[in-house]
């Protein structure tokens, strides 16, 4: 056994014995789990006491299920006390950092993090002495190599193309619950997501296509902030809420830009426009340069432009994505969602995911512009 593996073994054994002595979390025997990229990894559920999360979205997903008190390091992007760190998302609300930022800010670095960090930093991770690593680097070779270097389990998560609504995200929550002895918590969160999804879909299921307005979503994040031309023809929130997407005929699925000419051609069909808040900072200077860019847009001229919260900031804010789905459903079908107060729904969903109501804090971030709202375009962009 090499020194790294021996060190990891002794640390894990020490933690297990200390838990047994003090009546800590219930520990089950060793078992093999399959992570979200198909790797079989040997783990001892409930035994882990020093956790590191690496890669976009890993710490966020862990925060939904695991105990943040077990963290022994965080990426620089999630430690706001550092003078040199990736700060491109700081103006956007990331609920997991709102809930647990005070803890994150006390921890040593396990890597820089951020969109430009495309591989784990093994030496920094090793310096944190974790007994398990939760990763969002979805590459088998990378995970295997890191696990061999560290001598501790490396578990890779995945959310899938549909984010919070994807089976992969729910399976990741279940996997975290299994590993950290939080199966009941994971089951409760998955059930909550499924119940919320079913409720939204049920409310809109009887609307005939002919009675549906055409809606344009724009400003969706994809490796950075974007503008009014970044959209998706298979936007999952629209599909869950039974909303007619004005965009169709694109060659590929997923978030992508459309040509300015196509935007103009679709303008007369856009009954409602929804802008993701992260894109506003890019749209503002474009609008100042050419205020005619929305002249063809029916929704703009009719005053039917709305703001949803930014749901991509160092990968997906899963709770925000779910809240956004309620918001767009209420925006497009107000009579069917008259009973839904979006601030109360924001608090409810944040509490289910992170144990804390935080609508006021989310809406106070600079790139939230005060929260969900119908935009007065003359004053907002003028």
Image: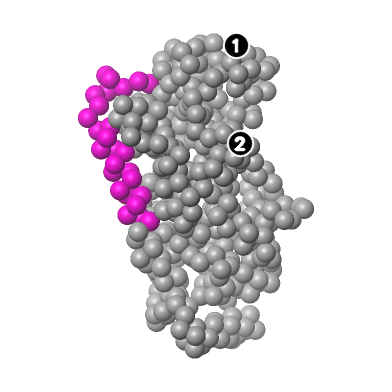
Image quarter (top left, top right, bottom left or bottom right) of the N terminus = bottom right
Colouring method of the image: one colour
Which of 110 and 62 lies nearest the eye of the viewer? Answer: 62
Q: Residue at x 49, y 22 (%)?
A: 305
Give x and y (percent) for residue 158.
46, 55
Q: Which mark is residue 27?
A: none
Q: In this picture, is 104 found above or below 325?
A: below
- Quarter of the image holding residue 201? top left
Q: Earlier in the sequence, mark 1 or mark 2?
A: 1
Name the spot of residue 52 as percent of width and height, x first: 58, 66
| Number of numbered labels in the structure image | 2
Question: Which range is magenta?
Answer: 189-214
Residue depicted at x 31% and y 38%: 200
Query: Would you say residue 382 sits in the magenta stretch?
Result: no
Tell me if residue 152 can be seen.
no
Which of the pair 294/40 is nearer the observer?
Answer: 294
Q: Is residue 49 left or right of residue 291?
A: left
Q: Decide which of 193, 99 is in the foreground and name it.
A: 99
Label 1: which secondary element: loop
Identify the residue at the far left of this view: 206
Residue 109 occupies quadrant? bottom right
Q: Which residue is mark 2?
A: 367
């Amino acid at each position: 056994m090499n020194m790294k593996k021996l060190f990891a073994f002794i640390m894990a054994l020490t933690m297990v014995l200390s838990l047994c002595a003090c009546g800590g979390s219930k520990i089950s025997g060793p078992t093999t789990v399959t992570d979200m990229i198909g790797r079989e990894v040997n783990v001892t559920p409930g035994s882990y006491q020093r956790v590191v999360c690496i890669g976009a979205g890993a710490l966020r997903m862990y925060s939904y299920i695991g105990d943040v008190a077990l963290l022994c390091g965080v990426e620089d992007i999630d430690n706001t006390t550092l003078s040199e760190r990736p700060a491109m998302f700081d103006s956007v609300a990331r609920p997991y950092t709102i809930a647990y930022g005070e803890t994150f800010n006390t921890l040593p670095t396990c890597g820089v993090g951020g969109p430009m960090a495309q591989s784990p930093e093994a030496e920094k991770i090793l310096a944190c002495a974790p007994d398990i690593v939760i990763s969002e680097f979805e590459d088998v070779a990378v995970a295997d190599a890191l696990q061999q270097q560290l001598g501790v389990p490396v578990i890779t998560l995945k959310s899938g193309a549909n984010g919070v609504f994807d089976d992969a995200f729910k399976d990741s929550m279940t996997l975290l619950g299994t590993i950290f002895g939080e199966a009941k918590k994971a089951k409760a969160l998955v059930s909550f997501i499924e119940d919320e999804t079913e409720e939204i879909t049920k409310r809109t299921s009887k609307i005939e296509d002919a009675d549906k307005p055409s809606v344009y979503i724009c400003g969706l994040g994809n490796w950075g902030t974007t503008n009014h031309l970044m959209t998706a023809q298979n936007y999952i929130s629209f599909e869950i809420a039974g909303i007619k997407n004005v965009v169709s005929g694109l060659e590929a699925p997923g978030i992508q830009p459309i040509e300015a000419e196509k935007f103009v051609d679709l303008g007369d069909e856009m009954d409602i426009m929804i802008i993701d808040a992260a894109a506003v900072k890019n749209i503002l200077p474009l609008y100042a340069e050419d205020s005619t860019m929305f002249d063809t847009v029916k929704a703009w001229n009719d005053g039917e432009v709305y703001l949803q919260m930014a749901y991509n900031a160092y990968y997906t804010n899963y709770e925000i994505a779910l809240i956004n789905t309620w918001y767009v459903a209420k925006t497009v079908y107000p009579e069917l969602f008259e009973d839904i107060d979006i601030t109360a729904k924001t608090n409810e969903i944040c509490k289910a995911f992170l144990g804390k109501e935080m609508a006021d804090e989310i809406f106070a971030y600079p790139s939230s512009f005060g929260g969900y709202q119908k935009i007065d375009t003359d004053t907002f962009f003028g």
